[in-house]
Amino acid sequence: MKKQMAFFLAMLFGAAPVVFSQIKSGTWELSLSGYMGSESSKIETTTSAGKFSADGDQKYLKLSLRSGYYLVTGLALEPEILWFAAEGIKPGISLSGNLAYNLGVSQAPVALFGLIGFGKANGTPFVQDLILRTSDKFDVDVLNLGAGAKFFLAKSVAFRTEYRFQRYHAENSVRFGSLSGKQTRTTQAHNILLGLSVFL
């Protein structure tokens, strides 16, 4: 076990110089991550008869695919797609454009990063974080905020870990018989992402 740990640490610190060469201008990064987390939701409906609200909590697992292009050293534009489907339900899609700043750690094969992004979706998280389609338009606003680290395992491969906060917000008109009103749905999700990045 000690030999394996020593070998791993030697490999890890031997890869330190590659971090700065991989987060430079013109580099592409492809990443696949898995989300594990929990979320809380609150729905408020206002009608002429009064105001109604409901809330709930849930835990979930989902996947995210993103590509990144380094505009300048350390600064990457990262388009991201989330696609969810369940049997008998139309798929939901979320598209976001994230901007990430990466900072290499001196003498270590690690890059720290922070990101902010905005996007649109045709649904909101519901039932174990399936993004269920709520309309045929992309009228759900998405906010992404995140921070994490990339640990380089080799010159072109890094293990990526990230904390991600997401906020989905949508407003819809509703009708209950002769009553009409507006429904606002806001979902805030806290996620831990684990995945791999490949640099080209």
Image: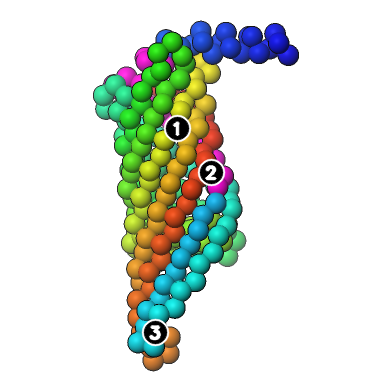
Residue 32 circle label: none
Estimate how packed mark 3 is, as few (under 14), some (14 to 19) or many (20 or more) residues with alpha carbons within 10 Å: few
The segment highlighted magenta reads: 19-37
The CA distance from mark 2 to mark 3 is 37 Å
Viewed as shown, does residue 37 lie left or right of 4?
A: left
Residue 32 percent coordinates (x, y): 50, 36
Viewed as shown, does residue 7 lie left or right of 106?
A: right
Front disc: 3 or 1: 3
1 or 2: tag closer to the N-terminus: 2
Disc 1 target residue: 148
Residue 177 percent coordinates (x, y): 43, 90
* Number of marks present in the image shown: 3
Q: Is residue 32 magenta?
A: yes
The CA distance from mark 3 to mark 1 is 44 Å
In the rendered structure, which amino acid carries the disc numbered 2?
A: Tyr
Find numbered disc 2 in the image and state the secondary structure of the residue it sits on.
strand
Q: Is residue 160 magenta?
A: no
Estimate how packed mark 1 is, as few (under 14), some (14 to 19) or many (20 or more) residues with alpha carbons within 10 Å: some
Q: Is residue 54 visible?
A: yes
In the rendered structure, which amino acid carries the disc numbered 1?
A: Gly
